[in-house]
Amino acid sequence: MKKRTYEVGDFVIKEGDDANEVFVVETGEVEVSHDEDDGTRQKIKKMEAPSTFGEIALLFNTTRTANIIAIKQSIVWSIDRSEFTAIMQNTNETNYIER
């Protein structure tokens, strides 16, 4: 896991970029938005700590489906694809064994 600090206006994720990480917001607040064809940016929602994002692109092996922009100074942890896969596999194995 990597810890990063984002200032107001910093992009954590840009829509259309390749996806290699999932993110956990420790402190702060981020905004989820979508770029429209006419060049405008559509605000979707705000997310405060604690929250997670970025898993859709990893789970479905797609590019990023939205922008994530810091609207308050934010501390965000990232988990790369291999760590995320290991966590998901271990979680599934544990759930199966406990049944």
Image: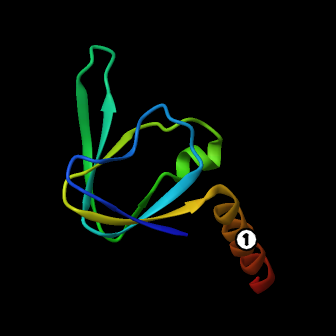
Kind of residue indicated by mark 1:
Asn
Pointer 1 residue: 92
* Residue 38, image quadrant: top left
As rendered, which of 58 and 75 lies closer to the eye?
Answer: 75
Residue 53: x percent and y percent?
44, 55
Q: Is residue 28 left or right of residue 59?
A: left
Q: What element carries label 1?
A: helix
At 54% from the left and 47% from the top, the residue drawn is 56
Q: Count the numbered circles shown.
A: 1
Relative to 33, say whether 71 is above or below. Answer: below
Relative to 29, say whether 87 is above or below. Answer: below
The quadrant the C terminus occupies is bottom right
Q: How crowded is mark 1: few (under 14 residues within 10 Å), some or many (20 or more)?
A: few
Q: In this view, does 29 lie to the left or right of 60?
A: left
At 24% from the left and 56% from the top, the residue drawn is 7
Residue 69: x percent and y percent?
29, 47
The quadrant the N terminus occupies is bottom right
